[in-house]
Amino acid sequence: MSDIILHHYPFSTFSEKVRIALGMKRLAWKSVEIAGLPPRPLLTPLTGGYRRAPVLQIGADIFCDTNVILPALERLHPAPTFYPAGSEGVAQGLGFAWERQAWIPTIGVLVHFIGEHIPPEFIKDRKEGYLGIDISKAAMAPQFDQHVQFLRAQFAWVRQALSTRSFLFGNAPSAADLALWQTVYLLRKNCPPDVDALLGLAPLAPWYDRISAFGHGTSTPMSAEEAFAAAKAAEPVRVVHLEPNGDPGGLKAGTRVTVTPDDNARVPVTGTLVAANDREVVIHHRDTQAGDLHLHFPRLGFDVVAA
């Protein structure tokens, strides 16, 4: 089996979600640090233009979005599981809903505390090429009270859910725990301690610490050049976990398609449909330098249409 390679940057909270997931499964992996914003000249050819982080690479198979990365790790390394006690559907749905709804309010609180330290070029990129909104401290200030109210209400049910158990589904952590944890991680890592009182996070500290204790597994630095060479030297693995003609929209294997995030960073990735179902889509993409690649995307949160 090829090495697990994670393309990520240190202050990316979604990257931290995957780093903790690798730690939870006690995996060894290669670490390729990328810039927090484009250009990423050796990663972009591997993703067909997809620009969000993190990206997981296994040989010539490229996994885009944490909601396809975790299921891929689960298939390859089933224990310990991300989905205890038959929780897979609920854990995936809850994690997706949380990340989609909590992301902007979380940024709003974050920039209230540290907005003056965010580089102008990062704010410009997020406004023009990524989120489509201005995340500067001044621009987000008018919504601060609403963002606090939203997050307090969300964390209220989390506190209640965790009042009688160690994790959301009982005594074992799940993918949903990791999705919620990465939001708390972003706030607690970067904001002053009084953010706990502001959002009602203090009762969640034991749960937060239990997940933090998983660490990041065993990582070894890898250069972008080495990762690119690994993809170029490999062949995509035959897809056996999806039906070639299982696309819920009726698209057939061999159809030229585009896959585009439906919320932000809406850069379409073009390729030939390999296999799909209502949870994942795999396309073949050929790069002039990297060669043949399989790009994997979650179906939820992405538009898949004939090119």
Image: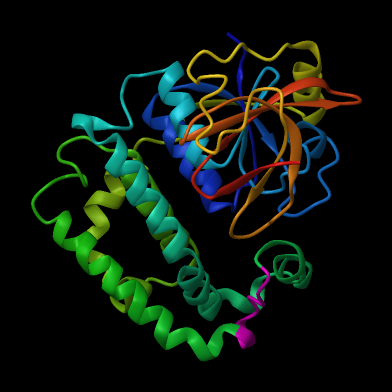
Which residue shows up at 51% across the image and 26% down it? 246
Question: Which percent across, then down, holds residue 153?
Answer: 27, 74
* Along the viewing direction, whichever of 225 and 269 lies nearer the viewer: 269
Q: In terms of depth relative to the viewer, which is nearer, 245 or 35?
A: 245
Question: Magenta segment, principal secondary structure?
Answer: loop
Q: Is 25 situated left or right of 62 in this image?
A: left
Q: Would you place residue 24 above or below residue 133 in this image?
A: above
Residue 142 in picture, x, y percent from top left: 53, 91
What segment carries the magenta color? 132-139
Residue depicted at 58% across the width and 47% down the height: 302
Residue 51 forms part of the magenta stretch: no
- Indicate the position of residue 120 as horizontal and vertical percent values: 76, 73
Type of colouring: rainbow
From the viewer's perspective, tell me whether residue 187 is left or right of residue 79: right
Vertical side of 94 occupied by 254: above or below: above
Quadrant of residue 33 within the rendered picture: top right
